[in-house]
Amino acid sequence: MHREDFPMIKNNIVYFDSGATTFKPQVVIDSITDYYQNYCANAHRGDYHISQIASSKFEETREIIKNFINSKNTSEIVFTSGNTESINLVVFGYFRHQLKSGDEVLITKSEHASNVLPWFVLEKEIGIKVKYIKLDENKELTIDNLEESITPNTKVISIAHITNVVGDIRDIKSICALAHKHNILVLVDGAQAIAHTKVDVQMLDADFYTFSSHKIYGPTGVGILYGKYELLNKMFPINYGGGMNTLFEHDGYYELKSLPHRLEAGTPNIAGVIGLGSAIEYVNNIGIDNIIKYEEELKKYLLEKLKELDFITIYNANSKGPVVAFNIKGVFSQDTSVYLDKYNICIRAGNHCTKMLKDEINIKNTCRISLALYNNKEEIDLLINVLKNSENIWKEIL
């Protein structure tokens, strides 16, 4: 699907690691090059022409993101360095000032490190309690299990929209409805979801929603924090400096800008933001619904082929997201990855930044295949053929 748009495909690589980062289409590369070659200046800092162009392009991306996720206005869209910073901004810029000792935050053991460690820090700093929602037999989050986990002390639910190993797609709309019934706020880690499902933050009613540019065919080093205006307006910056203040005096008096700029201190990744705008427009031109349908068909085909191999263990055969976690029986996951790399097949191996998931699936490391719109069935066939010959794995890698 649109493989010709991605220069990396020409390098004879079968790339099954888009959950880590996606390849970039030529239009994104061109937009970044255009900035550096034709109007390379700081945004919101100069009165001269090329600076005005940079400022305009920068804010155009904010409008593109607003429309893409259907937020109410651009003041609810904050640019960060990535999904990790976005989550940290929510935890330390907002919840550090709202929660108190004994308040409970609900997460799951299948969350990414970026949605776990900040809460652990807050637990040590102010005495909140991090608790875990029980997962079902498919290692997925259910509404019933969530409801059983809620207590009068629960103040936050912080979960991924799609998890990066199990690949379960959470019912965020129902989760938010249940949470708000109990006056609980919801932070949604959308890193793995933004390129693979339709995100409408007003329909979902998420309080905060975060994602990274590089997971949706954009450049690295750019992230998005969406938050409801009334919540963002109570958020304290975690960075202070140029671009986010209106004035400061020698006596220590200072005033900060309005949203979203007061949360965007310093010179931003201008080229990256512009590249993200091009990536979102690229996805819009294809149609997110078309992408979802194509990836669902590809995932179904991949599972059918893997299940034909009796020496393969699949850990998430029932999940809906474009992710498959597996191992070759008796083979360490990293050895499988090295073996496949001999045939220019790229997969992820390890714990995938979800170190607590071992408590649920009873194994520490797995191989992960994460699909994207540029993958096809021919690549899957090649993978299967190489796996069929994996009895030679030790000769290949030693």
Image: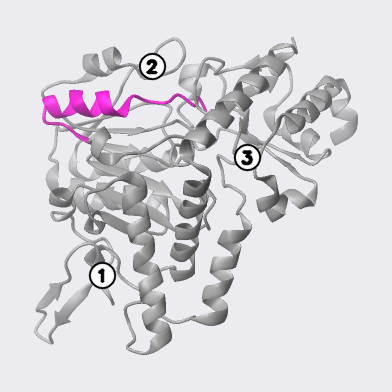
The residue identified by callout 1 is 240
Q: Which mark is residue 142?
A: none
Query: What span is colored magenta in the figure?
Result: 165-186
Q: Residue at x 40, y 43 (%)?
A: 114
Which amino acid lies under the numbered mark 3 shown in the image of this protein? Asp
Q: Secondary structure at mark 2?
A: loop
Number of marks drawn: 3
Q: Secondary structure at mark 3?
A: loop
Callout 1: 10 Å neighbours few (<14), some, many (20+)?
A: some
Q: Nearer the viewer, residue 334 or 39?
A: 39
Chain-order first, disc 3 or disc 2: 3
Q: Is residue 153 visible?
A: no
Q: Nearer the viewer, mark 3 or mark 2?
A: 3
Q: Is residue 117 above or below residue 364?
A: below
Quarter of the picture containing the N terminus is top right
Chain-order first, disc 3 or disc 1: 3
The extreme bottom residue here reads 48
Which amino acid lies under the numbered mark 1 shown in the image of this protein? Tyr
- Left or right, residue 103 beside residue 119: left
Callout 3: 10 Å neighbours few (<14), some, many (20+)?
A: many
The residue identified by callout 3 is 17
Q: Is 180 within the magenta?
A: yes
The residue identified by callout 2 is 135
Q: Is 90 within the magenta?
A: no
Quarter of the picture containing the C terminus is top right
Q: Is residue 1 visible?
A: yes
Q: Position of residue 7 (x, y in %)?
A: 70, 55
Q: Nearer the viewer, residue 125 or 324?
A: 324
